[in-house]
Amino acid sequence: RRAARGPQPPQRPPSPSFRSRTHRSRSAMFTPMPAMPVGGGHPSQSMLSMRPYFLAILVAQSIAVTVQVFFVLDILPGFINAIALGLGWYAYSMDMHITFICYWGMMCLINGAFDLVRFIDAAVHYGGPLLSDSTTANVQVLVHIFGPLSFLAGAYLAYSMYKGYESLDAMGRGDWASSRSEGAFFAGQQSASFRTFAGEGQRLGAC
């Protein structure tokens, strides 16, 4: 016979592995960002008033990206800028869709800031005059200045449109308030016409 053992000390749970701890710490780290507005329906008059400025910035960005890719041969940054430009043109084609305008503005801010810092870093370490007698070199310098500024201008415009949308939506006169008000009207009409336990009763088996 085996001797009866006393109460065993509680076993400690196995410590999480390094991979699980790393995954948990990475998942806990995030950038606080506001929720993107969800658009739909017809844009407001404030959005339509900014449509010419939106189109002008898109045209300027298109020229800058075209020269950056096909003339300066700055392929990878030009491709990333082209993705942001595609979002802008898509928002324009979708009747100034506020969701895609916000995505376009975020990418404009990131790409414009990185391209501007990269140009400043190259200009500081160059040590010579930026403009020279070479037309090609001057065009490259102008593209590296004009491109980031056009994208930063797009980020500012997108932020202005977002703030205008939020202020109108808070007052109930947002871009899509008309559709919501119509839905509430029909829901109120339906609820007003329906009453619980109203009407005549029916008896089962009645002749």
Image (spheres, rainbow, N blue to C red):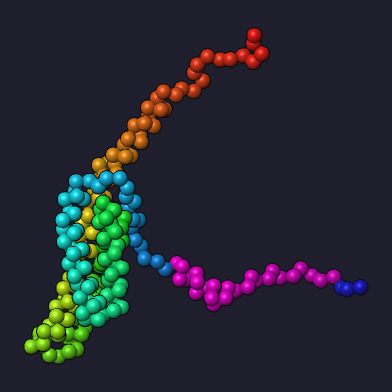
- For the N terminus, give its image quadrant: bottom right
Q: In the shown orientation, is residue 175 left or right of residue 198?
A: left
Q: Residue at x 19, y 50 (%)?
A: 48
Q: Residue furthest left?
A: 133
Q: Residue at x 68, y 71 (%)?
A: 11
Q: Residue at x 64, y 9 (%)?
A: 207
Q: Residue furthest right?
A: 1
Camera-side residue of 3 and 68: 68
Residue 196 image point, x, y percent? 49, 23
Q: Which residues are magenta?
A: 4-28
Asked where in the image residue 79 lies, by quadrant, the reply is: bottom left
Residue 74 image point, x, y percent? 26, 80
Q: Is residue 47 above or below residue 113?
A: above
Residue 77 image point, x, y percent? 28, 76
Q: Residue furthest top?
A: 207
Q: Please say whether residue 17 is visible from this viewpoint.
A: yes
Residue 85 image point, x, y percent? 26, 66
Q: In the shown orientation, is residue 157 left or right of residue 21?
A: left
Q: In the shown orientation, is residue 198 left or right of residue 188?
A: right
